[in-house]
Amino acid sequence: MNKKQLTTRFGIQQALHWFVTGITIPILTLMFQAKGLDLFDIGIVMAIWIGTTACLEIPLGGVADTYGRKRTYFASLVVSVVGVSLLLIADNIWLISLAAFFLGGGRAIYSGTLDAWFYDAYQSAQGKDQYHGHLAQVQVFVTLGLAAGSLTGGYLPQISNLFMASSNNPFSVNLVVVIALTILLVGITAMLLKMEGNNEPKEELESVSSVLSLSLKTLKHCFQTPILFRVIQGTFVLGMALSVVENHWQPFLHIVMGSENTTYILFGVISALYFLMEAFASLASVRVAKWLRGSHLSVLFYSRMAAGIALVFLALSQDTMMFALGYLGFFFLFTLGCNSENILLNKNSESSMRSSMLSVSSLAVTLGGMAASLGFGLLSHHYGIQISFICCGILLIVTSFVYVLKLNHQPQTVT
C-alpha cells in the first residue's frame, strides 16, 4: 500500500468515526433536559465526562503504545457503546453520570491511538513523503464527517416524531443509530486499516507497571524536550480558548441579535460554516507552511496571534454580520496551526511513546478547557461575555510568543 492509498483509507475511516460522533453534537444538552436534568445537573454530568477523560488520558495512551493502537481503538469503541447504551436507558442523574464516566473513558482510550498508527504506517508505506499535505487531507475528511454527522443528528429527532408523535424523548433515536453505527465501524475499520504495522507491539503483553512507566517516561521526555514543552504549553492555552468560545458564543450571539428579526436558524448556519472553516484552514495550512519555509513553529505563532486579534474583533461585534465574520475568522485562524502542532508532536516523539505523547497533548487541551470553564465562566458572570472574549484574545496574543522564543536547536520540518 502506498502513502496515497493509506491516506485515502485512513481519511474514510476518520470521516466515518467522526460522523458517528457528530450525531449527538446538536442534541446532547436537549436530550439531558428531556431526561429531567436542569442546567446545574448538566454541568455536573459534563464535569464527570471531561474529568474522566482528563484522569485517564495519559495512562491509557501508554496502553495504546504497549498493546497496539488498533487493538486499543477497538476497545474504545466497545466502552463507548456501553456508555451510549447506559445513556439510552438512563432516567436519573446517577445513571446518566455513570454513562458519562464510560463515555469519558472511551474518549480517553481513543485519544491518540489512530493518529499515532497513521504516522507510523505512513512512514513505512511506499511513495514520496508529503505527510503535511496528506495529514491536511485527512483533516478535511474529519471535518466533513463531523458536519454530516451534526446535520444528520439534527434531522433524526424530527424523523422520530413522525413515527412516535407522543414520544417524550425524540432524541433516543440518535443514540440507537450511534450504537448501531459504532458496531459497524469495528468491521469497517478492520477492513480499511489492514496495513501490516510495524507499529503494533512485537512483544507479549506487558504489565500495568510497564504502561505506567511508559507514561512517566513520556512526561519526562515532554518536559526535557524544549520544542515539545512549548507546544504543550500552547496546547493548554488552545484548550482554554476553545472552551471560552464554545461555551459563550451562543448566548453572546443572542445578545448581539437583540431585537433584530432573525430566526434561530442562524445558529445552525454558523455552526455548519464553522466546519467549513476548519476544512479550509486544514488545506490552507500546507500553503502557509511553505510560505514560512517549512517552519511549523512560525505557523503556530502567526496563526494563534491572528486568532487572538480575531477574538477581540468578535468581542466588539455590534451586529450579526460582524459576529459571523469574527467567529468564523477566529476558527479559521485558530485551526490553521493544528496540523503543524500535530506534526511537531509526532516528529519529536519516539515511536514507542507516540500515542502517549498525543495523549499528553489531549490532556493539556482538556485541563485548559476545565480551567477556562471555571475561571472565564466566573468572569462572564460578573463582567459579561465581552470582557471574557477580550481577555482570552489578549491571552492568545501574549502566549503565541512562546513558539518563537530561541530554541537550543532548530526543529525539523516536514513538507
Image (spheres, rainbow, N blue to C red):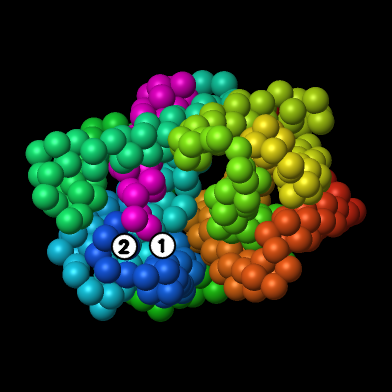
* Residue tagged 1: 108
Q: Residue at x 46, y 21 (%)?
A: 4
* Residue tagged 2: 32
Can see residue 316? yes
Quarter holding residue 388: bottom right
Which contiguous range is marked in magenta? Answer: 1-30
As drawn, 42 above or below 185: below
Q: Is residue 22 left or right of residue 311?
A: left
Is residue 9 part of the magenta span, yes or no?
Answer: yes
Q: Residue at x 67, y 32 (%)?
A: 321
The image shows residue 390 at horizontal and vertical percentages of: 78, 56
Quarter holding residue 223: bottom right
Amino acid on which the number 1 mark rests in the picture: Ala
Amino acid on which the number 2 mark rests in the picture: Phe
User: Disc 2 versus disc 1: distance between alpha carbons?
Assistant: 22 Å
As drawn, 31 above or below 309: below
| Magenta: main secondary structure | helix
Quadrant location of the N terminus?
Answer: top left
Q: Mark 2 or mark 1, which has the lower sequence index?
A: 2
The image shows residue 119 at horizontal and vertical percentages of: 50, 40
Is residue 24 part of the magenta span, yes or no?
Answer: yes
Q: Secondary structure at mark 2?
A: helix
Q: Nearer the viewer, residue 71 or 105?
A: 105
Can see residue 413? no
Q: Nearer the viewer, residue 404 or 71?
A: 404
Tell me, for residue 261, which label it has, or none: none
The image shows residue 173 at horizontal and vertical percentages of: 18, 46
Kindly indicate whether the residue at mark 1 contacts the one at mark 2 (C-beta within 8 angstroms): no
Q: Residue at x 74, y 28 (%)?
A: 288
Q: Nearer the viewer, residue 302 or 241?
A: 241
Q: Is residue 181 left or right of residue 203?
A: left
The image shows residue 350 at horizontal and vertical percentages of: 57, 54
